[in-house]
Image: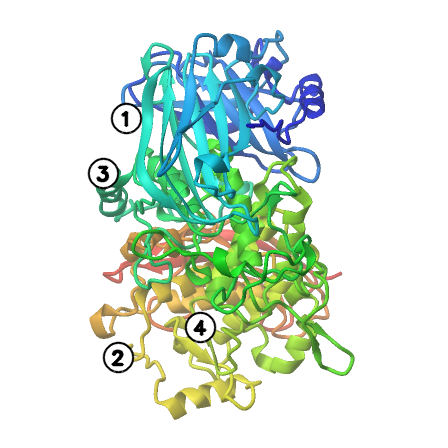
């Protein structure tokens, strides 16, 4: 018998939201306050007629918007108000809105036309009644039909009982959506018990009815679970909107699709929304990218991937630009900090990027990582399955009769059977984030589900977890999971590849940051992210003592001989996301400080050839029998191996994208929440590397500005806030910078970091020191500035307040100087 679950959006929560105004009976106000802009958006035309509802979502900075405040989208050209609906779903710790679902009734716009708008707070207006299912689906039909290889078809009415279903996602006068869930009856799947249907029914006031569904073969460790062979189709109002030929639905994969129809015929393409990039950066939802040059790989990747992928879009396991072999190396735009499509969506909102991001989210959900705990109604968690791992399935199996709390793996006959020829496989070292951008900017509920699924998988799939160290120094591998220490929860420190750890940390952090407040087992995802960080955080003192001057390197696959240079930047990206989004916990800042030490010191130790770090290659950290503890030992190892990177870049140069990742990591550390003196050293390293000339083989190092906007732009073009990788844009010292130093500070004491916007500084020659110049200071020249903008005492400075005048500069490929303005900086000497 089919059942419909009410979902986690309970009637009690819905009522409280209506009373508080967090939902949309106050969807638009009687008048707007132009002094309270919230976001700068644009409606992107699709050729749809007037009145079609655009559905989207957005992130907001902490404290910016209360859930009780009404908002309205206002045209920039004539200040006309557009009917707007807001449903907050995720909160900051102070209760302000972090993520909200939005809907707007759009005017008619030609395809490609952009209407600039601003989202503003609105005065409370008349109460507008929300939509009702009884009226929305009157006379409508929506059916999913499963056609098994053998036996009778199964028909499921997706609209039955909607009026009684109290689950709500979008809810207001413009859009209404509800979730229905049921097991696909085993008698219609040749006895297979592990397949379920999850469907989001979405209706808008313009008469459009959409179904966003997931057929998931994901129930873990269930008697009768296994692959199921069937075809299926979805029909709306008697018209087939999706049809999939017979295929084998293997375990732990899901088929996610969405289709719709208007009341009188085919569904028009809903208008799209260009997000507020600056707000997303300010709110911590993305690290800053350089946007000063166009994306060079847009047509080559986005346009061509869509064109090539569309003919196979209705097959069971399409790829749509995602490598079927997850571990494949080389140029891949669908992995990294964000996918290429996700990056372009954030930066420009381009319709092709939005389209491909949705399709790749669906493909990402088809990978064999969907582990559903049917009894608990959640993705598999370590708190419920403390001994379980889905890793090393070829040797790790566990009979069905073993209880959950002792189960160590899948039954022998229920292992994953995904292969790289027919399916899309999954791999920690190359695991992408296909869900966060779609969830954050479209509000698609399936994307939030995928975000949680992936975060649960990256933890459950690790087979070597952090052990507890006993008083005698021995390791206890059988302690219960503890997120406070990461013991038996996070991967063992150093066990994954560095990039695998980075992308896993990114995945658990984004889930902790973005999942709705009322998502099932919501607090688990917070603890999950903390466990990954705390596993290092509680051990920093021990690690630092063991590694001496080299403290901060990240182990790679339990290795004790080298650490991959460029991959460390990926860890910075993930940690910065966790910190910016408020989910890193008390150990987060110290862990970032620890990891940053190794990268920064590699560019600031005179006994070490910094180009060995700049090239992004492996950096020696031991000889196989003992760990190194000094930079002199590391440099000696390069000499012994004969692979020192020379000043003319004629050998041992690494990869161009590796070099740019190293440079991007340094640039981001300039603005990171670490010690100011280390930020200054990061800036020194960034300017040092940026000032290299392309004199090496094949024009290395490959750090010319256009290269940051090539196929690896989604990783390479990350940049200091307000800055650009271009060489022809003058750097501008930020106005109003003030520093304080004690009057008894010794010569050489650090004063502060002078920060620039615009072009990042670049010296006139390799290893030059003229990227910053002091043109005026007190008599005796008591201050000096480093190549990256670090101010230090160069002598005894008299007590009092002093004004220094400085400029920063850069040099282009023709060695033409682009000097920024001379700007005063204040230094206060004295307590």
Q: CA distance from mark 2 to mark 4?
A: 21 Å
Q: CA distance from mark 2 to mark 1?
A: 47 Å
Q: Nearer the viewer, mark 3 or mark 1?
A: 3
Residue 440 placement (x, y as % from top left): 50, 37
Residue 319 appears left or right of 435 = left
Q: Nearer the viewer, mark 3 or mark 4?
A: 3
Q: Please name whichever residue, 672 or 341, is drawn nearer the observer in this view of the structure.
A: 341
Q: Which residue is mark 4?
A: 564
Residue 297 placement (x, y as % from top left): 26, 48
The answer to whether residue 555 of the structure is visible from this angle is yes
Q: Which residue is mark 2?
A: 650
Mark toward the start of the polypeptide (3 vs 1): 1
Q: Which residue is mark 1?
A: 112
**Do labels 3 and 1 touch, CB within 8 Å?**
no
Q: Which residue is mark 3?
A: 311
Mark toward the start of the polypeptide (2 vs 4): 4
Q: Please name whichever residue, 588 or 219, is drawn nearer the observer in this view of the structure.
A: 219
Which secondary structure lies at badge 3? helix
Give the crowd class for mark 2: few <14, some 14-19, many >=20 residues within 10 Å. Answer: some
């Amino acid at each position: 018998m089919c059942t419909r679950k009410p979902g986690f959006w309970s009637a009690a929560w819905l009522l409280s939201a209506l009373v508080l105004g967090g939902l949309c009976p106050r969807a638009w106000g009687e008048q707007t306050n132009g002094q309270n802009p919230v976001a700068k958006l644009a409606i992107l035309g699709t050729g749809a007629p007037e009145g079609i509802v655009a559905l989207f979502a957005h992130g907001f900075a902490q404290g910016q918007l209360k859930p009780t405040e009404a908002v309205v989208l206002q045209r920039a050209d004539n200040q006309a108000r557009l009917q707007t609906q807001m449903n907050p779903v995720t909160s900051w710790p102070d209760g302000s809105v972090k993520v909200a679902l939005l809907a707007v009734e759009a005017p008619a716009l030609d395809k490609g036309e952009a209407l600039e708008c601003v989202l503003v707070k609105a005065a409370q207006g008349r109460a507008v009644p929300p939509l009702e299912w009884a009226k929305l689906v009157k006379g409508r039909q929506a059916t999913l039909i499963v056609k098994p290889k053998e036996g009778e078809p199964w028909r499921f009415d997706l609209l039955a009982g909607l009026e009684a279903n109290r689950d709500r996602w979008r809810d207001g006068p413009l859009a209404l959506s509800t979730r229905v869930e049921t097991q696909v009856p085993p008698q219609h799947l040749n006895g297979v018990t592990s397949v379920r249907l999850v469907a989001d029914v979405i209706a808008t006031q313009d008469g459009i009815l959409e179904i966003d569904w997931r057929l998931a073969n994901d129930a873990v460790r269930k008697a009768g679970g296994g692959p199921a062979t069937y075809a299926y189709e979805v029909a709306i109002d008697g018209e087939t909107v999706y049809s999939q030929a017979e295929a084998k639905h293997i375990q732990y994969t899901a088929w996610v699709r969405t289709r719709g129809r208007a009341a009188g015929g085919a569904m028009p393409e809903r208008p799209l929304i260009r997000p507020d990039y600056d707000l997303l950066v300010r709110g911590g939802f993305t690290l800053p990218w350089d946007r000063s040059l166009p994306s060079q790989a847009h047509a080559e990747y986005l346009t061509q991937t869509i064109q090539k992928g569309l003919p196979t879009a209705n097959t069971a396991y399409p790829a749509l630009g995602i490598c079927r072999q997850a571990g494949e190396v080389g140029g891949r735009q669908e992995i990294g900090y964000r996918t290429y499509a996700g990056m372009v969506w954030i930066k420009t909102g381009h319709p092709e990027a939005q389209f491909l991001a949705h399709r790749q989210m669906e493909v990402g959900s088809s990978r064999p990582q969907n582990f559903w705990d049917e009894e608990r109604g959640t993705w598999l968690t370590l708190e419920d399955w403390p001994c379980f791992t889905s890793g090393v399935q070829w040797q790790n199996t566990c009979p069905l009769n073993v209880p959950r709390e002792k189960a160590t793996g899948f039954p022998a006959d229920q292992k994953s059977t995904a292969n790289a020829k027919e399916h899309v496989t999954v791999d920690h070292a190359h695991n992408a984030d296909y869900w966060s951008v779609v969830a954050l900017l479209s509000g698609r509920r399936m994307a939030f589900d995928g975000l949680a699924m992936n975060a649960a998988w990256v933890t459950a799939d690790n087979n070597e977890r952090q052990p507890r160290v006993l008083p005698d120094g021995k390791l206890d591998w059988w302690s219960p999971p503890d997120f406070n220490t990461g013991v038996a929860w996070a991967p063992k420190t150093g066990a994954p590849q560095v990039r695998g750890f980075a992308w896993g940390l990114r995945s658990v952090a984004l889930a902790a940051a973005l999942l709705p407040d009322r998502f099932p087992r919501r607090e688990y995802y917070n603890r999950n992210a903390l466990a990954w960080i705390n596993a290092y955080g509680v051990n920093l003192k021990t690690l630092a003592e063991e590694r001496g001057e080299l403290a901060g390197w990240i182990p790679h696959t339990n290795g004790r001989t080298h650490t991959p240079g460029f991959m460390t930047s990926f860890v910075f990206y993930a940690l910065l996301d966790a910190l910016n989004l408020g989910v890193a916990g008390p150990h987060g800042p110290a862990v970032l400080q620890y990891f940053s030490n190794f990268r920064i010191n590699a560019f600031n130790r005179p006994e070490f050839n910094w180009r060995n770090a700049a090239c992004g290659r492996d950096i020696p950290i031991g000889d196989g029998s003992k760990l190194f503890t000094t930079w002199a030992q590391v440099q000696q190892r390069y000499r012994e191996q004969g692979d020192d990177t020379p000043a003319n870049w004629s050998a041992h140069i690494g990869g161009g994208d590796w070099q740019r990742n190293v440079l991007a990591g340094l640039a981001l550390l300039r603005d990171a929440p670490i010690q100011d003196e280390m930020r200054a050293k990061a800036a020194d390293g960034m300017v040092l590397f940026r000032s290299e000339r392309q004199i090496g083989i094949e024009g290395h190092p490959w750090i010319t500005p256009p290269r940051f906007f090539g196929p690896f732009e989604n990783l390479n073009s990350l940049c200091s806030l307000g800055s650009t990788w271009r060489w022809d844009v003058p750097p501008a010292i930020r106005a109003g910078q003030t520093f304080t130093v004690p009057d008894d500070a010794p010569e050489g004491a650090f004063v502060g970091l002078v920060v620039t916007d615009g072009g990042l500084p670049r010296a006139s020659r390799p290893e030059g020191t003229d990227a910053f110049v002091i043109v005026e200071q007190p008599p005796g020249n008591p201050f000096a500035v480093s190549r990256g903008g670090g101010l230090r005492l160069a002598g005894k400075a008299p007590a009092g307040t002093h004004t220094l005048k400085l400029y920063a500069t850069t040099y282009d490929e023709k060695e033409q100087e682009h000097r920024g303005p001379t700007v005063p900086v204040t230094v206060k000497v004295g307590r």
